[in-house]
Image: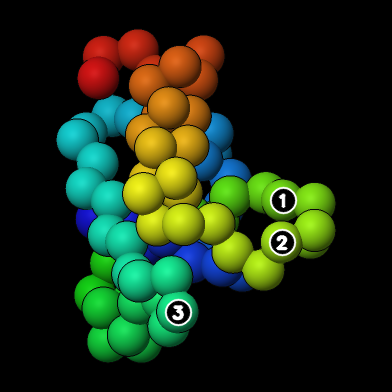
Amino acid sequence: TVAAVARGGVAPEALPRDRPIVLVMGNEEQGLPEASIAACAARVTLPGSGAVESLNVSVAAAVLMHALVVSPRATGL
């Protein structure tokens, strides 16, 4: 499982692709509870320009899933 966090996670391209990935997304206002983040095996953060505070959760999920599927390392998904 991979927690999507605003800061402190790896880039989507750095996630291991040798097994299925479950993305855990929080809401736009508060994100994921700390207990949920702690229960995940990894954390991922979308790189951004800092121009906006956060993305809509559906947009963030779509961007993450796209990055996981089209990444050069995404073979075998």
| Secondary element at tag 2 | loop
Q: Residues within 10 Å of mark 2 (few under 14, many from 20)?
A: few
Tell me, yes or no, whether the two marked residues, 3 and 1, touch with CB atoms within 8 Å: no
Q: CA distance from mark 2 to mark 3?
A: 13 Å
Q: Quadrant of residue 54?
A: bottom right
Q: How many marks?
A: 3
Residue at x 38%, y 21% (from the top left corner): 69
Residue 28 location, x and y as percent? 43, 70
Q: CA distance from mark 1 to mark 2?
A: 8 Å
Q: What residue is shown with label 2? A: 52
Tell me, yes or no, whether the two marked residues, 1 and 2, touch with CB atoms within 8 Å: yes
Between circles 3 and 1, the one closer to the viewer is 3
Residue at x 80%, y 51% (from the top left corner): 49
Residue 67 position (above or below residue 58): above
In the image, what residue type sits under mark 1? Gly
Residue at x 21%, y 33% (from the top left corner): 19
Between circles 1 and 2, the one closer to the viewer is 2
Residue 29 in view (yes/no): yes
Q: What residue is shown with label 1? A: 48
Q: Residues within 10 Å of mark 1 (few under 14, many from 20)?
A: few
In the image, what residue type sits under mark 2? Val
Tell me, yes or no, whether the two marked residues, 2 and 3, touch with CB atoms within 8 Å: no
Q: Residues within 10 Å of mark 3 (few under 14, many from 20)?
A: few
In the image, what residue type sits under mark 3? Glu
Q: Which mark is on residue 29?
A: 3
- Image-based side of 63 in relation to 41, left or right: right
Q: Quadrant of residue 70?
A: top left
Residue 18 location, x and y as percent? 28, 29
- Image-based side of 52 in relation to 49, left or right: left
Residue 59 location, x and y as percent? 44, 45
